[in-house]
Image: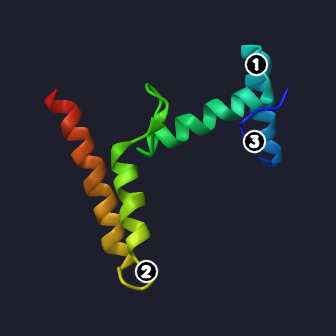
Amino acid sequence: MPTKKKRVGFIPRVEVMKIIEKLSLENNLSNSKIISILVEEALSIRGIFNKTNGKATQSYLKIERNSEDLSEGHIDLQTYKKFLSFLKFQEMMEKYKK
């Protein structure tokens, strides 16, 4: 039966693969599932993905839309990084207010 999900190739370092295999055995999950969980956690920590609703965060979507409008060289990388930090802070403050 065909699936709509795309497969992603991943060749981890030897030590990373050992960790994945250990987690897989301990949790009785496939390596693919462990990698999926780890990727979601990493994106969540970076403020890109909301694990609760399974969607990209609003701040990330705003950045994505804004970056489409920027052509290379029109923005200084340091300023852009500060802007990303500000959006993350703004999102955290909105959660705090609730």
Of residues 13 and 42, the one drawn nearer to the viewer in this rendering: 42
Q: Which kind of residue does numbered mark 2 sit on?
A: Ser
The quarter of the picture where residue 41 lies is top right
- Of the numbered discs 1 and 3, the one sitting upstream in the chain is 3
Residue 74 picture location, percent across and down: 36, 84
Which of the two discs, 2 and 1, sits closer to the camera? 2
**Left or right: 85, with 23 as reference point:** left
Residue on which the image places disc 1: 29
Q: Is residue 13 above or below residue 40?
A: below
**Left or right: 37, with 28 as reference point:** left
- Of the numbered discs 3 and 2, the one sitting upstream in the chain is 3
Label 3, label 2: how far apart the Cα atoms are? 36 Å
Instruction: Count up the numbered dots.
Output: 3
Residue on which the image places disc 2: 71
Q: Is residue 90 above or below residue 94?
A: below
User: Which of the numbered marks, if any, corresponds to residue 17?
Assistant: none
**Left or right: 59, with 18 as reference point:** left
Q: Is residue 43 above or below residue 80?
A: above
Neighbour class for label 2 at 10 Å: few (<14), some, many (≥20)?
few
Identity of the residue drawn at 80% across and 39% down:
17
Residue 67 picture location, percent across and down: 41, 67
CB under 8 Å between discs 1 and 3: no
- Of the numbered discs 2 and 1, the one sitting upstream in the chain is 1
Q: Quadrant of the N terminus?
A: top right
